[in-house]
Amino acid sequence: MLTASPEMRKSIRKTAKDLSRHEMTQWKSIMCDLDREMSILEVGCGRGGKTDFLKSQGFRNILGVEKNIHQVEECNKRGLNVVSLEDFDAGYSETKFDFLVLSHIIEHFKFEDLISFVDGYLKYLKPGGLILIATPMLHPHFWLDLDHEKPYYPQGIKNFYSGNSEQVGFSSEYELKLKDIRYRKSPFKVKNDRNLLLKKNDLPILLVNLFCAALFKFSFHVLGYKTGWVGLFKLKS
């Protein structure tokens, strides 16, 4: 029996995950020249992971908005400035921000709902302000998240907000110009496997995935494939 122990399974998966990290290096590249004093609105900040990252990069004026009140409370306990949707509507209705962050949120919306959602936050962005969108593309593991509605691509967002969209039945008063684009890559790996799901005789597949993650890391992300993108857009004045 080549079944990994719970401790071994956890250790292998953690090591593989650490070796597979790539997205945040793309964030660093895309934000390297941005003013660290700008005011930031992070929508759907969750447990504050991206907020922590922004702070680690020198950004200090960050407001997070989160619908899950328990996560709001946990973020506040950690000293993060995060408010609920209700508190944001009540206290920041007239506030304008320099930078809007939508990280791994647009893939949870159908198109007709996405436009009203994005436009609803673009009104809080100053003219000439920036918006960062990070989201997965369609890849073999996209639908493992049950609340994913559909993948969105930078070309589609760019075209819709160009001011010349031919999308029938939908339009926006806002225009966005793409300033920079980076793609997230991931290592090849096995996910939909009987032994992995049952946690029986799973050690060989765990080791294969670990090996692929190591190849990805030490090939400088060449031996992998695109699974998402990070785009920086500018709101036209």
Image: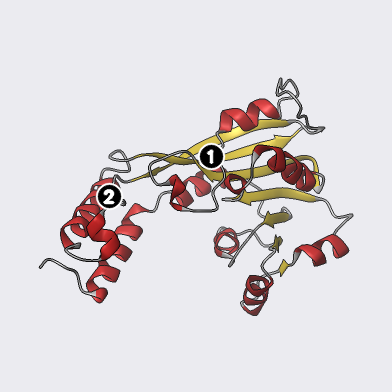
Instruction: Tell me the amino acid under the disc marked 1.
Output: Pro
Q: Secondary structure at mark 2?
A: loop
Of the numbered discs 2 and 1, the one sitting upstream in the chain is 1
Report the residue at 15% width, 58% height from top.
204
Circle 1 residues within 10 Å: few <14, some 14–19, many ≥20: some
Q: Position of residue 220 (x, y in %)?
A: 31, 43
Residue 67 falls in image quadrant:
bottom right
The image quadrant that residue 113 belongs to is top right
Which quadrant is the C terminus positioned in?
top right
Residue 97: % across, % down: 78, 51
Instruction: Determine whether 224 is above or below 19 in the image.
Output: above
Spot occupied by residue 226 in the image (x, y as percentages of width and height) = 40, 38
- Reading the image, the residue beneath label 2 is 190
Is residue 130 left or right of 202 when viewed as pictured? right
Quarter of the rendering occupied by the N terminus: bottom left
Asked if residue 111 lies left or right of residue 57, the reply is right
Q: Is residue 174 left or right of residue 40?
A: right
Q: Nearer the viewer, residue 133 or 62?
A: 133
Q: Which residue is mark 1?
A: 151
